[in-house]
């Protein structure tokens, strides 16, 4: 049974829309994660500056010593969170790039380069894998963030 040109058009639009939706979702996730990454890095820099100022003083009051210990405890946790967010951003960028490449290859396949069809599926699958891994990194960071807050308020050791 031959496919009509309408069926081919509908399939092409469906494929393009799937990629557009995934590209948009990736972009929204990236915007939020990049904002979080910037915030975490700024917090590390700010705490490190405060730490350096305190270490330059000849003597510290008891509260300053406690604050210094708190800063020394917080910085590694913030860096660990920043690393997870960085990994999530990288994987989401990679997934987005693969979605863009698969859109390009779909265009080539639509122009008649049939061997590109297998490449489309591979690129799309790798793009989805990148998106999934990026989301897993973001979930790990959210979980770690909550654990660190619980530890800082004394609910966990």
Image (tube, rainbow, N blue to C red):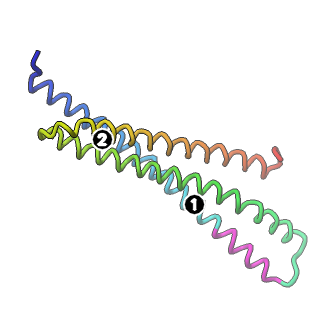
User: Label 2 belongs to which residue?
Assistant: 20
Q: Is residue 113 left or right of residue 55?
A: left
Q: Is residue 150 left or right of residue 5?
A: right
Q: Is residue 64 above or below residue 21?
A: below
Q: Is residue 107 above or below residue 57?
A: above
Count of numbered tags: 2
Marks 1 and 2 sit apart, C-alpha to C-alpha, by 29 Å
**Neighbourhood count class around disc 2 (C-alpha, 10 Å): few under 14, some 14–19, many 20 upward:** some
Residue at image point 50% right, 45% down? 134
Q: Is residue 4 above or below residue 113?
A: above
Q: Can you tell which quarter of the image residue 83 is in?
A: bottom right
Q: Position of residue 100 (x, y in %)?
A: 30, 47
Q: Is residue 51 magenta?
A: yes
Q: Is residue 119 magenta?
A: no
Q: Position of residue 26 (x, y in %)?
A: 41, 45
Residue at image point 48% right, 53% down? 89
Q: Can you tell which quarter of the image residue 17 is in?
A: top left
Tell me the quarter of the image containing the N terminus. top left
Q: Which of these two is toward me, 136 or 150?
A: 136
The chief SS type of the magenta part is helix
Residue at image point 81% right, 83% down? 57
User: Label 1 belongs to which residue?
Assistant: 39
Residue range highlighted in magenta:
45-57
Q: Is residue 152 left or right of residue 43?
A: right
Q: Secondary structure under badge 1?
A: helix
Q: Position of residue 75 (x, y in %)?
A: 70, 63
Q: Which of these two is toward me, 109 or 61?
A: 109
Q: Is residue 90 left or right of residue 21?
A: right
Residue at image point 11% right, 21% down? 3
Q: Position of residue 88 (x, y in %)?
A: 51, 50
């Amino acid at each position: 049974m031959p496919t009509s040109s309408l069926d081919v058009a509908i399939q092409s639009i469906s494929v393009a829309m799937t990629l557009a939706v995934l590209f948009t979702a990736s972009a929204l996730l990236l915007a939020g994660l990049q904002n979080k990454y910037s915030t975490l890095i700024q917090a590390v820099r700010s705490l490190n500056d405060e730490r350096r100022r305190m270490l330059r003083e000849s003597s510290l009051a008891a509260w300053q010593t406690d604050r210094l210990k708190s800063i020394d405890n917080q910085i590694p946790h913030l860096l660990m969170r920043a690393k997870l967010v960085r990994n999530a951003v990288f994987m989401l960028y990679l997934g987005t790039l693969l979605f863009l490449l698969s859109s390009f290859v779909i265009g080539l396949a639509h122009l008649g380069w049939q061997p590109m069809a297998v490449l489309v599926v591979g690129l799309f699958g790798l793009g989805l894998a990148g998106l999934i891994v990026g989301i897993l990194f973001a979930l790990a960071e959210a979980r770690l963030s909550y654990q660190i807050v619980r530890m800082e308020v004394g609910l966990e050791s």
